Amino acid sequence: MAIETHYKLAGVMGWPVAHSRSPVIHNHWIAEHGLRGAYVLLPVQPDQLAQALRALPVLGFAGCNLTIPHKVAALDLVDRVDPLARRIGAINTIVVEADGTLVGRNTDSFGYIQSLLQSQPDWRATHGPAVVVGAGGASRAVIVGLMDQGVPEIRLTNRSWAKAHDLAQEFGGPVQAVPWTERHATLAGAALLVNTTNQGMHGELELDLCLDDLPTHALVSDIIYVPLETPLLAAARQRGNSTVDGLGMLLHQARAAFEAWFGVLPAATPTLRAKVQATLIP
Ligand code: ATR
């Protein structure tokens, strides 16, 4: 009989999940590192999330990623939530420990910051204020990442004022809520702009944001990766700003999850990027 313990399974639980690019990424690394295992799609309906999570240890999974709509619900279903995931308020990675304990983690902040640094190695938190557009789940991960890097001022603007206000109250420190009507003017003096809304995504309207007040030395990033160059990034590039697309965050959040399951921190190489990019034709 084969030695089953050397074969590791991981996957992504979501509903729907068929569109996920995570299998391409993780299976690339499994092959690259000569590991025995597989990363699979796990379509799980919301009302069956608890059962599906409890099946992970039984089926020999090292863990899984969680995507829409499970990231928040899982907080109450795992045995332990690590402090970073607790602050972000969502779990994107579950690690199954040797005794079957389920630990909830979040690698999205790491993914966002590593993506910035890979694309712009000279970027430093101390360069100045950041403007974050959007106050949903993705915004929370980006803000926590920026706070932990030591960004001195984070201007958070969101269409719905209450969400920006509440998030700024919750996080405190450098995070200040800025009314939506002041989103254009708040770009003055910023060193970094991040779009965490869905505006600019394939099939959505473009983000309604005028870049005139943004310094041309500011870095402009989008967490959207379909299309790779959103209207925001195109406008920023045309006026001379450096830009960072959302594919980097997808690859880098995956690196930390892979390391947790397989014990190797893999690289987001140009080859992998091209491979995933080839699947992004909208
Ligand atoms: P995610 O988990 O990807 O962050 P989300 O939690 O649904 O998704 O958040 C979506 C974000 O996009 C929110 O900040 C949302 O603004 P509201 O809080 O006002 O809903 C923002 N968003 C969605 N549609 C928008 C629009 N037409 N204009 C501006 N912001 C929009």
Image (cartoon, rainbow, N blue to C red):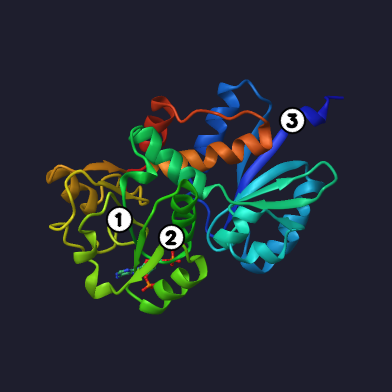
Between 10 and 148, the one lying in front of the other is 148
Query: Which of labels 2 and 3 is toward the front?
Result: 2
| Alpha carbon separation for disc pair 1 and 3 | 38 Å
Crowd rating for badge 3 (residues with CA inside 10 Å; few <14, some 14–19, many 20+)? some
Decide which of tag 2 and tag 1 comes sooner along the chain.
Answer: 2
Q: Which amino acid does label 2 sit on?
A: Ser
From the image, tell me which residue sits under label 2.
139
Give residue 120's mark.
Answer: none
From the image, tell me which residue sits under label 3.
7
| Alpha carbon separation for disc pair 2 and 3 | 36 Å
Q: What residue type is labelled 3?
A: Tyr
Q: Where is residue 67 in the image (x, y as percent from the top left)?
A: 55, 55
From the image, tell me which residue sits under label 1.
202
Q: Quadrant of the N terminus?
A: top right
Badge 3 marks a residue whose secondary structure is: loop
Query: Which of labels 2 and 1 is toward the front?
Result: 2
Q: What residue type is labelled 1?
A: His
Instruction: Tell whether 254 sits left or right of 100.
Output: left
Look at the picture and state if 265 lies above or below 223: above
Ligand 1's quadrant is: bottom left
Instruction: Tell whether 137 sits left or right of 49.
Output: left
Q: Position of residue 135 (x, y in %)?
A: 41, 67
